[in-house]
């Protein structure tokens, strides 16, 4: 076959590979538009009129043409087009390197022609972009954080630098595939380090946002402590005046019982001061105060003050508040709720017990954890709390349990998690 015709066919196959990758990334039909056909013919012609001895210049012109095409396909958005171009070129280069390395290990590198390499690349493009979920990569990366985009740009510039060096001596690519593989592994290791740094940064930002979200709880707790300190002197004064207002022993006893019952609500929350998770303590104390306003008493028992968990503290607090909030909503005025907090084998054990007017079977309790299932009146958030609770426990590989028992002629619902 004529060498001139072979170079045109190889260039056409390369453009076809880029065409397929771009359209699969953007989830577009493979049927070309007239303008795309004209642009493809122009690029193929342009890349073949430039002399072969100007290899670096030829490669740069090709990259510029493909960049313009990517920007056009990205609705003329330069940033998204540049990002699309980088991911497309990365995909193409990795496939080409895979072809080169595989061929050099199986056959003599000198027997790999441009046409055979282009055909092998096109075949792999069809397999990868039609038989795997690889085309979803662009959507995920375009929606990712900016550091990942900068990471790709950095990798692309390194690739350009390495390839321009190799273009000056193409035989070094075929003779030293392991050297090329070492360069790729070096780039990969650098990028993994940057990604790990970005992951750690995002994790810290998530914790910071959680603390900001729970800051009102801390402020409410501080205000409540200040109010209790101010009220302490008033309570002492009220107790000191009881003998003057109660003229007989019976009335004095009744008044003392009434006062001490009213003042004892906050005492049940004092075990929370022992635990080493301030956010968990503040969140539970805040819910206990809300329960007290409904004349519902929450008893806390901190079995172990030193708590540990494989999940962050804000996650533990969210899960604990879901169970306690559901218990408060299921209780009536005058009811008691019992909360136990323990730590075993490096995991927190949190249990909530509340009374129930109805006895539930295990199957009925299991329905509580289904999405949008609720025994309360319909509202926007009904049925989502325990569903989120279950999903979060599973994500952190924890465990949870539930039961309905009868004790002292009372029905109790018991829910717990180990995390």
Image (cartoon, rainbow, N blue to C red):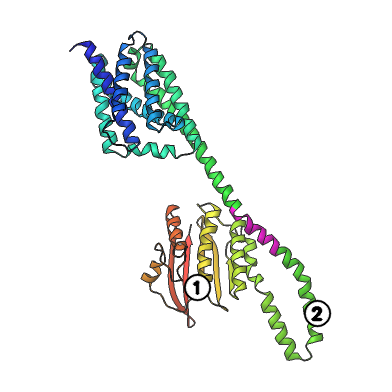
Q: Nearer the viewer, residue 145 or 37?
A: 37
Q: Nearer the viewer, residue 130 or 165?
A: 130
Q: Quadrant of the N terminus?
A: top left
Give the residues in magenta: 213-224
In this view, 391 is above or below 58: below
Classify residue 340 by image quadrant.
Answer: bottom right
For the point 78% across and 75% down, the residue is 236
The mark found on residue 266 in the picture is none
Dot 1 corresponds to which residue?
330
Q: Nearer the viewer, residue 133 or 187?
A: 133
For the point 69% across and 60% down, the residue is 222
Classify residue 8 by image quadrant.
Answer: top left
- Where is residue 227 drawn, in percent x and y? 73, 66
Classify residue 14 by image quadrant.
Answer: top left
Predominant secondary structure, magenta span: helix
In this view, 341 is above or below 313: below
Q: Nearer the viewer, residue 293 or 345?
A: 293
Dot 2 corresponds to which residue?
240
Within the magenta stretch, is there residue 152?
A: no
User: Can residue 225 be seen at all in this image of the molecule?
Assistant: yes
For the point 53% across and 44% down, the residue is 203
Horizontal arrangement in the rendering, residue 16 relative to residue 333 (left or right): left
For the point 53% across and 62% down, the residue is 320
Horizontal arrangement in the rendering, residue 362 relative to residue 346 (left or right): left
> In 3D space, how far apart are the residues under numbered discs 1 and 2 (Cα atoms)?
39 Å
- Where is residue 24 drawn, in percent x and y? 31, 35
The numbered mark, 1 or 2, whose residue comes first in the sequence reads 2
- Mark 1 or mark 2, whichever is nearer to me: 1
Within the magenta stretch, is there residue 221?
A: yes
């Amino acid at each position: 076959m004529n060498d001139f015709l072979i170079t045109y066919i190889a260039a056409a196959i390369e453009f076809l590979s880029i065409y397929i990758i771009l359209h699969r990334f953007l989830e577009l039909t493979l049927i070309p538009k007239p303008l795309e056909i004209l642009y493809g013919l122009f690029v193929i012609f342009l890349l073949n009129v430039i002399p072969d001895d100007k290899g670096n210049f030829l490669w740069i012109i090709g990259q510029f043409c493909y960049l313009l095409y990517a920007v056009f396909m990205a609705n003329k958005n330069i940033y998204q087009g540049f990002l699309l171009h980088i991911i497309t070129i990365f995909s193409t280069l990795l496939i080409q390197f895979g072809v080169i390395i595989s061929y050099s290990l199986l056959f003599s590198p000198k027997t790999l022609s441009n046409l055979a390499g282009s055909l092998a690349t096109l075949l792999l493009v069809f397999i990868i972009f039609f038989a795997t979920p690889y085309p979803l990569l662009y959507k995920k990366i375009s929606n990712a954080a900016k550091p990942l985009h900068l990471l790709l740009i950095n990798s692309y510039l390194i690739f350009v630098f390495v390839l321009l060096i190799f273009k000056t001596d193409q035989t070094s690519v075929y003779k030293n595939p392991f050297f090329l593989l070492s360069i790729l592994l070096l780039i990969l290791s650098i990028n993994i380090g940057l990604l790990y740094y970005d992951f750690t940064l995002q994790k810290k930002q998530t914790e910071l946002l959680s603390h900001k979200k729970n800051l009102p709880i801390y402020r409410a707790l501080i205000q409540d402590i200040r109010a209790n300190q101010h009220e302490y002197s008033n309570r002492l004064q009220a107790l000191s005046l009881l003998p003057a207002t109660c003229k007989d022993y019976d009335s004095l006893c009744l008044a003392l019982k009434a006062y001490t019952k009213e003042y004892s609500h906050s005492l049940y929350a004092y075990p929370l001061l022992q635990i080493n998770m301030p956010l968990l303590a503040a969140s539970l104390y805040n819910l206990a105060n809300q329960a007290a306003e409904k004349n519902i008493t929450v008893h806390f028992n901190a079995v172990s003050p030193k708590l540990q968990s494989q999940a962050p503290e804000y996650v533990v607090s969210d899960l604990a508040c879901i169970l306690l909030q559901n218990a408060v909503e299921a209780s009536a005025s005058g009811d008691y709720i019992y909360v136990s907090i323990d730590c075993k084998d490096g995991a927190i054990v949190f249990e909530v017990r509340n009374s129930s007017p109805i006895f539930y079977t295990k199957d009925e309790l299991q329905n509580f954890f289904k999405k949008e299932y609720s025994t309360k009146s319909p509202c926007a958030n009904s049925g989502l709390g325990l569903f989120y609770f279950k999903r979060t426990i599973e994500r952190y590989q924890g465990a949870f349990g539930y039961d309905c028992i009868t004790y002292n002629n009372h029905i109790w619902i018991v829910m717990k998690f180990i995390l």
